[in-house]
Amino acid sequence: MSHTQTPTSKRGKLVNLRNFPGFNPTAWFVLFFLYMPLIYVVIYSFNSSRIGAVWESFSLKWYGKVFENTDIQRALKNSLQVGLVATILSTTLAVMAALGLLRMKRAGKAVAIALIGAPLIIAEIVLAVGTLGLFIAVGVPLGKVGLIVAHTAFCIPFALLPIRARLSQLDMAPFEAASDLGANEKQILRRITLPLLAPAIFAGALLAFAISIDDFITSFFVAGPGATTLPVYIFGMIRSTVTPEVNAISTLLLLFSGSVLIGSYLIQRKRR
Amino acid sequence: MTAVTTPPKKQAQRGRPGQSSPKLAYLPILFLAFAIGIPLVIIVIYSFLEKPSQGTGVKWVFTLENYKALFIQEKLDGTTAIDTRYIKVLWASFYYSVITTVVTLALSIPTAMWIATRDARKRNLLVALVTLPFWISILIRTYGMRQIIADEGPIGKFLAIFDVSFSILYTPTATILGLIYVFLPFMILPIYASAERFDFRLAEAAYDLGAKRMTVVRRVILPSIRPGIISGIALVFIPALGSFLQSDMLGGGKTNMVANVIANNFGQARNWPFGSALAVLLIVLTLLFVLIMQGVAQRRGDKVELV
């Protein structure tokens, strides 16, 4: 325990040591810096003025515009479809990879880890244009199928992170017991491994979904004209001008991310 | 006789009982080889091919021109001269990323230490506050930043009271500010993870033995949080080097980074082979950085896994 209090005579010094000059204001500045742009976006989404920076009066008209805009709805639908399918596929593949990697030989494991780690290290733009080249060479049509393939690939390492972490902490006793009692590999997988990994698989899926929904660069190159995702659509809207409508979309997305996070937190707390 | 059949069975279960067969990993590896491995190979191949006289794509003729064109310009009269445009782009990407890393580090060490020294309940809340931006679209965060630093934005309006003019949008400063903003949590969290494990009784012991406060920070605290600092540097520098959105949306095209030039060559400029050569250069620089970081970590005896 790093936070045990030592006897009172020394407490004065200890408290002193926990407060370095300048740390407190720096931390508050950092929090302010992190949140000011987001708070600004939320506040100005309720601004009736067409010019972003001038506050006129409270209004919900930009939300109305968002709900009337069928292009946004189509883009949102594309994003959700691609995100859900890519989440399911990447999480499944990540579970398989995590379990299989445990007993792989060194050479195979090195190749596997290099492939899994590549999307974390290599700039997304490089993989995006490479994927574009691949799809055109192989004849994968640009659109949802291509998007799903590309998203599944770069979501795997993120889905894998919590699963591998959990796997390395697992208590081996239930596995030994099951195997001593004659359970075969499949039974152990279904009845012990997967239930024990469930919270990590859930966390991995959540991470994969967030990464897929948020993706811009790869989607920009691979989506083609028919399967524009929400980030690609928003990028088109804001590249040149400031549109208050985007503040409204952003606020809705913030609300969505926030509720997903709180929801998953509550689910996990309930399980415990 | 039956004993003959048991050894292979036992062997299959050796190591840890109940583990799945390594064959389970074959499908994901095959998929990644297709969707990650082949695109990388394609980029390397494209970088050695010619560009077709019309349209996009490549012409299957081997050439080294794309790499030459990174540094040397051929003029219309046939003479050649050193071309500094792309060297400047590479330098800008490197320089912006270094500043981003240094500033986020300077902000993150105090912030992470401060969070780590709060009581448990406050600590959890603060960690959640720093983590939340991870779940918010980078596009939206960059867009928010653009409105904040716009000439007529809140900072500009505030400074106008004192008759100070404020105009940084569409300059390199704006790009760097955007990079710092987007990548700051990537620095705070790993340093916090190290700082949280730090036993503050060690700092107290050093203090009792007569060390000054800054000596305690330098000699006791910083070495203990070094693994977090190294991961943080890697997590900020690597994505910053290849970033696209901040220079596009905040730098306004005047301050291109490598990723913007690559994207442009695969877009409007329609020169896939040259874009590929730049991409290969970016991969090489990234891997070089990873190797250096691993070298530093190893020499220091820290176990740092970047993947």
Image (tube, coloured by chain):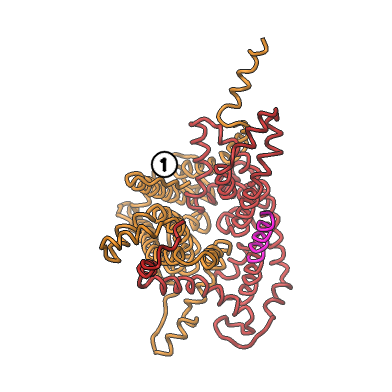
Chain colours: A red, B orange
* Residue A142 drawn above or below residue B14: below
**Residue wearing tag 1:** B63
Of the 4 image quadrants, the one containing the N terminus of chain B is top right
Q: Nearer the viewer, residue B158 or B84?
A: B158
Residue at coordinates 61% horizontally, 88% vertically from top-left? Answer: A56
Residue B133 visible in the snapshot: no
Seen in the picture, residue A157 relative to B269 is either above or below; the reply is above
The three-letter amino acid code for the residue at tag 1 is: Thr
Figure quadrant of residue A260: bottom right
Residue under the image location 39 percent in, 70 percent down = A23
Q: Nearer the viewer, residue A253 or B117?
A: B117
Residue B211: % across, % down: 26, 62
Q: Secondary structure at mark 1?
A: loop
The residue lying at 42 percent from left, 72 percent from top is A24
> Few, some or many C-alpha atoms within 10 Å of disc 1 (few <14, some 14-19, many ≥20)?
some
In the picture provided, is B91 more to the left or to the right than B122?
Answer: left
- The vertical placement of B253 against A162, above or below, is below
Q: Residue B135, percent across and down? A: 58, 62
Q: Main secondary structure of the magenta part?
A: helix
Residue B22 screen position, x and y as percent: 59, 32
**Is A267 covered by the magenta stretch?**
yes
